[in-house]
Image (tube, grey):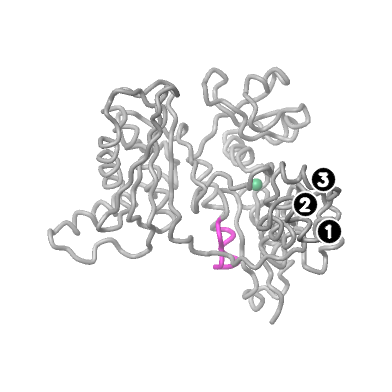
Amino acid sequence: MAERVIFHVDVNSAFLSWTSVKRLEHGESDLRDIPAVIGGDPGKRTSIVTAKSIPAKKLGIRTGEPVSMALRKCPDLVIVPSDFAWYRECSRRFIAACRNYSPDLEQFSIDECFLDMSGMRRIFPDLLAAAGKLKDEIRDTLGFTVNVGVGSNKLLAKMASDFEKPDKVHTLFTKEIPAKLWPLPVPELLFVGRASAELLARNGIRTIGDLASADTAYLAGLVGRKAAEQYHAYANGIDDAPVQSAPPEAKGFSVSTTTEEDVTERAEAHAILKDLADSVASRMRRAGYRAYGVSVQIRAGDYSVRVNRSRQTKLENPTDITREVWEVSCRLFDSLWDGRTGLRLLGIRLFGLTTEDSCQLDLFGTQEKREKEERADRALDAIRGKFGRGAISLGPRGNLAGRLRDDSREPGGSEKQDPPGRGKG
Ligand SMILES: [Mg+2]
């Protein structure tokens, strides 16, 4: 059997590039060329740098630091708020472009996916040329650049896409491991946390090559047997994880929002849940799923009060209807919250995913109504796909989209899925 060939496609500075695409349409400056960050309003509690341009990086600005600190390093810094509705739209376009190259696609985060190209040789006899074509096509039609890592498995492909950026194709096949992988420092290896890397370095294991040739019993004495086996395998480029084109059953879609002031009124909480239900249900619809499970999470504003709870329920019929998700969420919320503690965080998670149709049995004549609602939801999705999420707002609260946080580490919309201890590329 021929060797597997996996692509890992990774958008270069995704949030910054995507924001620039929109700004350029409006004749504004390209954030990639000036000191710029994605972050909130400097006065607000949630305002940290979530992405930075290369010129900002050169001024010492780091992801995760407060915007106020970044401003001290560069008073002329351009600060742009996050826009998750737009990111999701760009992500959708990015994934659609990649899917033209292989149906075997696993979305790994909002700006990364794996493609199993092993079965595509009849269509793309030269897979390396196909990688270049995919990269150029995304740049020329969508306006942002990607790196494509081409490797013998997911691990090697992902390592390869992290080599020199931007707008590059790199290979890391098994035979290239000694030359391209082994000279790299240990922290570059996927899933090796900073603490483990430091521990290994203190014991003379500094490069991935050192790790690959280390005695596993010795390694196990340092980091434990399980981690030792995994590190040793990865350092040798061994990884047989399949590209998972369908998410495992346990996965789901989730969304949450932190508010600037405590939420103390039930009606306000319900209004926020409406926005959240709208956001998470439309994202799930776009990925083609319905959910059997709904869960609601709340957290108190006052950390001395120990309220950080969630409650979930299972539905008889899977749903992707915004109204149903909202109603169930309000019911769960009412059972969770007694109204005595101000809340700062609300979240909804949809799980127990299925691709099957909703109602098989229609005892109460509700099916027709549901189908109508499903059509209405999809019409809304389509309009938003064209004009953005702000085009239509559901409630009196207006458009909360900019404040929603896609905090899921789950398929279809996770913001980042980096293993602990590794920076984002
Ligand atoms: Mg990226």
Name the amino acid type tagged 1. Lys
Asked if the beta carbon under badge 1 is closer than 8 A to the nearest atom of ligand 1, the reply is: no
Q: Quadrant of the N terminus?
A: bottom right
Label 3 crowd bin: few (<14), some (14–19), many (20+), radius 10 Å: some
Is residue 295 something that shows in the picture?
Answer: yes
Q: Is the C-beta separation of discs 2 and 1 under 8 Å? A: yes
How packed is label 1: few (under 14 Cα within 10 Å), some, or many (20 or more)? some
- Report which residue position mark 2 lands on: 163
- CA distance separating discs 2 and 1: 10 Å
Q: Where residue 306 appears, x then y in whole percent?
A: 40, 28
Q: Residue at x 70, y 63 (%)?
A: 131
Residue with the mark numbered 3:
201
- The residue to which callout 1 is attached is 180
Q: Which residue type does callout 2 highlight?
A: Phe
Q: Secondary structure at mark 2?
A: loop
Q: Which residues are magenta?
A: 97-107
Mark with earlier residue (2, 3) = 2
CA gap between label 2 and label 3 equals 22 Å
Relative side of 274 to 110, left or right: left
Residue 20 image position (x, y, % from top left): 62, 37
SS of the residue at dot 1?
helix
- Circles 2 and 3 in contact, beta carbons < 8 Å: no
333 up-or-down from 76: above or below: below
Measure the alpha-carbon separation of dots 3 and 1: 20 Å
Callouts 3 and 1 close, C-beta under 8 Å: no
